[in-house]
Structure formats: C-alpha cells, structure tokens
Amino acid sequence: MTEQEMIWVARIVTKTMMAEHPRPTQVNAVQAAEMLSLCPQTVRRMIKDGRLPINKCGLIPVVEVDRALAVKSAA
C-alpha cells in the first residue's frame, strides 16, 4: 500500500468515526484531563485558577479544552 493510499484510508476511517462518535460539546474534569494528557487534579487546579472556564453546569466546553491544547502545544 502506498503512502497516498494509506492517507486516503485514514481519512475515510476518520470521517466514519466522527460520524459514528461525534465529539461532545462539553466534558467533565476527568475527560478533559484525558484529552489534555494531564491528571484530573491539574485540570481542577486550572479551573480553580480560571485558566480553564466551566459553564453553569460545572462542565468544561470542548472549545476551551481545544484552546488549552493549542496553548500547551505552542509552549
């Protein structure tokens, strides 16, 4: 299988997975920790410090997790 074919297959698999398992719009601290490769205690500290906003339900919007990932990868 050529590299181009592998990329094509990966794209098809990704689209299929996204359709079957859509991303949640909000997550809890444990889920955010998994997404950020951090321990839940660190995520809770980030929430307490105001570095990771939560909504009125106490959940973290996924867009905020994405922002934290962008900051983490830029560092």
Image: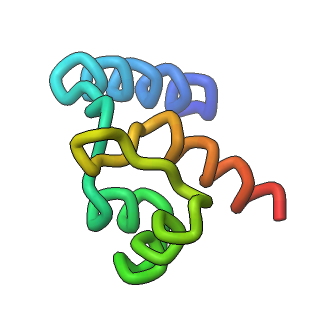
Q: Residue furthest left?
A: 20
- Give left or right: position of 20 versus 52: left
Is 18 situated left or right of 72 in this image?
Answer: left
Residue drawn at point x = 58 percent, y = 31 percent: 2
In the depicted structure, whether residue 27 falls above or below residue 31: above
| Residue occupying the far front of the picture | 56
Locate the C terminus and report the quarter of the image it occupies.
Answer: bottom right
Q: Position of residue 13 (x, y in %)?
A: 33, 27
Residue extending farthest right: 75
37 shown above or below 12: below
At x 48% / y 77%, what residue is drawn?
Answer: 45
Q: Nearer the viewer, residue 24 or 7?
A: 24
Q: Position of residue 10 (x, y in %)?
A: 44, 30
Q: Nearer the viewer, residue 14 or 60?
A: 60
- Residue drawn at the location 57% of the way across and 60% of the way down: 50
Q: Position of residue 65 (x, y in %)?
A: 50, 47
Residue at 27% across, 33% down: 24
Estimate the x, y position of residue 52 in percent, counting from the top left.
Answer: 53, 55
Residue nearer the viewer, 46 or 20: 46
- Left/right placement of residue 34 relative to residue 21 reads right
Colour scheme? rainbow
Q: Is residue 5 above or below residue 31?
A: above
Counting labels gives: 0
